[in-house]
Structures are given as C-alpha cells and as structure tokens.
Image (cartoon, rainbow, N blue to C red):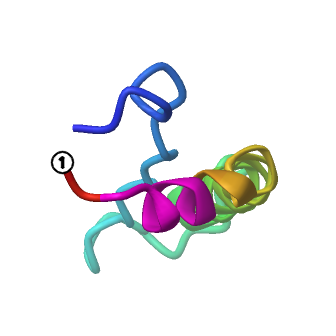
Amino acid sequence: MNPVTDNDPKPEPPTPPEPGDCCHSGCTYCVDDLYQEELDRYRAALAAWQERNSGVRSIISTRPEP
C-alpha cells in the first residue's frame, strides 16, 4: 500500500463488450460505440492520473528502505 496514491487510485479500464453483445443492427447506441467512448474517457483519466502522480514513483524509488 502506498499512502501517497491511496487517495488517488489509478483509473481502471472499462470492461470490453463480449463478442456477441453487438447485434450488428446499426443501433444508435451500439455497445461497441459506447465502449469506445468509455475507453476514450479512461485514456484521458489515465493520462491525467499519470501526470498527477509522475513524481510519486521517483519519490518512492529514492526513499531509503527502513
């Protein structure tokens, strides 16, 4: 456990749809399109998280062992 990142957990990727989830009927809100939107939001959240926590790894890695 890391007290520095415990309050800012790394974003979790969305669960991809199962192969049979899309009915291929041209739905307005296709599960594949919705997943792509979720994936785009995840990537943006991950990039923001990495930016916020970019110095954390160097602080942790240079901290002397107890």
Q: Say above or below: 66 vs 8.
A: below
User: Magenta stretch: residue 12 in it?
Assistant: no
Task: Work out whether residue 49 or residue 65 is closer to the camera in this orientation and state it.
Answer: 65
Tell me the residue at 36%/58% (across/down). 64
In the image: residue 29, left or right of residue 57: right
Tell me the residue at 32%/64% (across/down). 21
Tell me which corner region of the image, top left, top right, bottom left or bottom right, holds residue 55: bottom right
Q: Say above or below: 66 vs 16.
A: above
Tell me which corner region of the image, top left, top right, bottom left or bottom right, holds residue 22: bottom left
Task: Quickly name the residue at label 1.
Answer: 66
Tell me which corner region of the image, top left, top right, bottom left or bottom right, holds residue 14: bottom left
**The N terminus sits in image quarter:** top left
Magenta stretch in the rendered image? 57-64
Task: Work out whether residue 6 or residue 30 is closer to the camera in this orientation and state it.
Answer: 6
Tell me the residue at 33%/37% (across/down). 2
Q: Say above or below: 57 vs 48.
A: below
Task: Work out whether residue 49 or residue 64 is closer to the camera in this orientation and state it.
Answer: 64
The kind of residue tagged 1 is: Pro
| Place of residue 9 in the rendered image (x, y in percent of width and height, measured from the top left) | 46, 35
In the image: residue 8, left or right of residue 43: left
Q: Is residue 30 visible?
A: no
User: Magenta stretch: residue 62 in it?
Assistant: yes
| Place of residue 49 in the rendered image (x, y in percent of width and height, measured from the top left) | 69, 47
For label 1, the SS is: loop
In the image: residue 57, left or right of residue 1: right
| Place of residue 52 in the rendered image (x, y in percent of width and height, measured from the top left) | 77, 44
Dominant secondary structure (helix, strand or loop) of the stretch shown in magenta:
helix
Extreme residue in the top direction: 7
Tell me the residue at 38%/26% (across/down). 3
| Place of residue 50 in the rendered image (x, y in percent of width and height, measured from the top left) | 70, 57
Q: Residues within 10 Å of mark 1 (few under 14, many from 20)?
A: few
